Image (cartoon, rainbow, N blue to C red):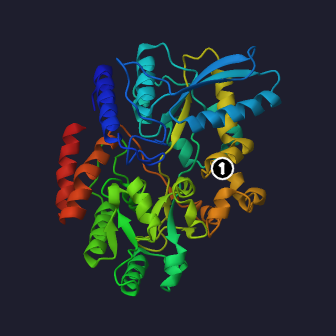
Amino acid sequence: MKRNLFSLLLCFVLTMSLLIGCSSNNTATSDNNPTDSAGEDQEASETGTQEGEAVADAITTVGPEDGTHLEMWTFVELHSGFYAEMLEQWNQENPDKQLNITFTTYPYADMHNKLMLAIQSGSGAPDLCDIEIGQFPNFLQGEVQFRPLNDVIEPYKEDIVQARLDIYGKDDNYYGIDFHVGATVMFYNTKILDEYGIDYTKIKTWDDYAEAGRQLKEASDGQVYITSVDTGGTDWLWLAMAEYGEDYTTDDGAPNIELDSIKNMITMQQSWLNEGIAMISPGGQVDMEEGFANISDGNIVSFPKAMWFMSRFLNYMPEMTDTWAIAPCPVFEEGQPRSVGIGGTGTVVSNQSPNADLAAEFLAWAKLSYDGNVKVWENLGFDTLNTTIWSDETITRDTGNKYIAYFVSNPFDTLNEIKDEIGKIKVGTINPAISEQFNLNILNNCFENGADVEDELATAQNALEIEY
């Protein structure tokens, strides 16, 4: 694929413009999810800009005035709060390395555009910056303009989920550090399932899942569905690819969507719709206002989503406490891996920073250390990169924690059960175009109109090859 820098930048800007247009409704689109929407935590405003200038939503400076000053950009104000809290602890523990950081929160598209322009021009980049996983490949083109983080990651590496390091890597270097694993799990409404005599713990395969759907349809007179299928999101497909060990981009980044995993998942979901045991997700996916209402109304009793969706329950469905259980996802054949990591935000250190080494040291400590990951769990509700948290019973059995208190099952029990089964899907520059084909064409045509799956995939593959 031959693209000069101008073409790449133009493509990036046009993509961002499209994403702003698609995200103008007031919804909580997929947290950390490059497959569905513009990106992570879009409670952060995605307002437009004036005359091409990036407008900051919030600016906060933390730390002593005589400390080493750093600039940090993010697109989620909650992230700024996390970093600020970690900075206060850092300064207490490191009197010889005092930091003063100005945190600036920009709208999603504005921040990524502004960072790209700074990287391309060679000036104006902050010391530290969050980059949503779907946009990260754009910043790895050519000579990477970020400081490699291998040395600062090394002290924590044996406790960190390796796949979440690899996803921000290039040529044996790691350039970004994430907040979470994003492990996909099944959420089950135990109250409705119990009412109709269905035991979710017995569901191991998709055949079991469909049979539970049939039982539910009969017992509820067709009033309740086992799940909803998405026309505006590809989480189900990511899960299927991970179960089969497939990926819809090749090693060199070319599109490759005509996969058995995708064909089988979409075909299976078509059969659920035809049988009347599943419905189409209102709004296109469950992580929308319409989706939350559909869940709250008891129209569906289960769906797969990354563990960061736990916060959606507490924020949008607080009345459903003691209702939902978390469990491993079903598989096509027993023995297949039962999860996939979805979404993320990789934080980078710019080569333009005059204090890059100190910035990198703080970043790794904040996001990879035990203390940092305790705050990631308690403040953000994310499944942590540092797996020592997963087995620390002072954390995992803390019934005072709002996430543990809300769910019927313990989130860490499931996380520990699937910890060696969390697959990864590569994220490259062609991924936004792949998502567009699925979200605008393939899934709608297959689920709304009953189109042939193989024909739809072949048509989209041809279009993607031309674009690639």
**Quadrant hosting residue 293:** bottom left
Residue 50: x, y in percent? 37, 20
The residue lying toward the viewer, choosing from 152 and 19, is 19
Residue 163: x, y in percent? 54, 48
The secondary structure type at the circle numbered 1 is helix
Residue 407: x, y in percent? 61, 65
Q: Is residue 198 visible?
A: no
- Label 1 crowd bin: few (<14), some (14–19), many (20+), radius 10 Å: some
Q: Is residue 27 visible?
A: yes
Quarter of the rendering occupied by the N terminus: top left
Q: Which residue is mark 1?
A: 377
* 212 relative position to 461: left or right: right
**Quadrant hosting residue 415:** bottom right
* 99 relative position to 243: left or right: right
Vertical relation: 183 (above or below) 431: below
Labels in figure, total: 1
Q: Amino acid at mark 1?
A: Trp
* 81 relative position to 212: left or right: right
* Residue at position x 41%, y 47% in the image: 27
* Residue at position x 81%, y 21% in the image: 96
